Image (cartoon, rainbow, N blue to C red):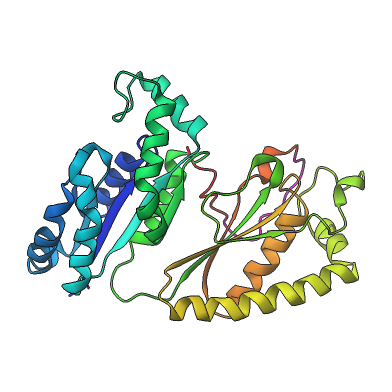
Amino acid sequence: MEAFRLLIVTGMSGAGKTQVLQALEDMGYLCIDNIPPVLIPKLSEICRQGGERTNRVALVVDIRGGEFFEALSTSLDNLKEMKVDYEIVFMDATDETLIRRYKETRRSHPLAPNGRITSGLKQERAILDSVRHKADFIIDTTNMKTAALKDYLKERFAQVGQKQGMAITVVSFGFKYGLPLDADMVWDVRFLPNPFYIPEYRHKTGRVKEVNEYIHSFDVTEEFKRRYFDTIDFLVPNYEQEGKSQFIVAVGCTGGMHRSVAMAEALYAHLSEKGYRVSIEHRDMMKNNVEEDFNPHQVISACDEQ
């Protein structure tokens, strides 16, 4: 029988918890929305003993529960005492995005029903800060389309049974579009030679052969890659040993089209050769004026989400 898996979905109001619950339900999870945290340990024990039909459970817990939400920390401690494994999925987005979504749906924020949305968001972030730091997965839906969110969830949660090691995601991005909110580590490669200033490369990405070769033709690139790979090779097994289930490495240049893409691809290839469970996403690449691109493998832009 497959191992029992419990997902606790929480995060900012308007960040996509409902879409996550619907997607998980489609994957066969028993899903319960807005459950009082005090009930989680008892419900988990019942589901764990219920056999195959209840061995995958997803629970949404958020500030709609009011004062009941304060019991979440105690409930998580109880789960550990009961030796019930769980994973926390935290949904997030920028305040600007959340405000836009609230205005589009004409809904008020649950913490500020008669006041400004910004006030409710500020209170909510303060309340959720401690649980966000405990999250196993932080999903930033600022630019994420619904289809991409479903693909992201399917990749990480449709597979059940024995874990296959830490999931590593390499994300290229452009600093002018902002940092990926869910990054565990950020590499700034704006010091590398920039193909943007070569007219024939300006509108081609770092995955195009001649652009990639140009970036790699400099000694500084090879020296950086040596240090870059050595650091990652040291960190990954140590993070795995500490029980980390997800590691997101973000690689940024100015526009997220040339240098960051090439270095993200290089790291992806390096980690793949070592047998790690790794995926790659180019968050901002197609936000630029791209006239030609070569895709050596399927790229799912999980941070290019709604």
Q: Is residue 146 above or below residue 52?
A: above
Q: Position of residue 135 (x, y in %)?
A: 38, 58
Position of residue 167 in the picture relative to residue 162 (left or right)? right
Q: Front-most of 34 and 286?
A: 34
Q: Quadrant of the N terminus?
A: bottom left
Position of residue 262 in the picture relative to residue 178 (left or right)? right
Would you identify the image quadrant in which residue 50 lies? bottom left
Would you identify the image quadrant in which residue 113 lies? top left
Q: Is residue 188 above or below residue 203?
A: below
What residue appears at the point 35 percent right and 54 percent down from the top-left corner?
Answer: 131
Residue 89 covered by magenta stretch: no
Position of residue 176 in the picture relative to residue 67 (left or right)? right
* Magenta part of the chain: 290-298
Main secondary structure of the magenta stretch: loop
Can see residue 48?
Answer: yes
What residue appears at the point 55 percent right and 56 percent down from the top-left corner?
Answer: 183
Q: Position of residue 70 (x, y in %)?
A: 23, 49
What residue appears at the point 31 percent right and 48 percent down from the top-left corner?
Answer: 10
Q: Position of residue 144 (x, y in %)?
A: 49, 41
Can see residue 34?
Answer: no
Position of residue 148 in the picture relative to residue 55 (left or right)? right
Q: Is residue 246 above or below residue 203?
A: below
Q: Front-most of 296 and 48?
A: 48
Q: Position of residue 93 (x, y in %)?
A: 47, 40
What residue appears at the point 59 percent right and 74 percent down from the top-left corner?
Answer: 272
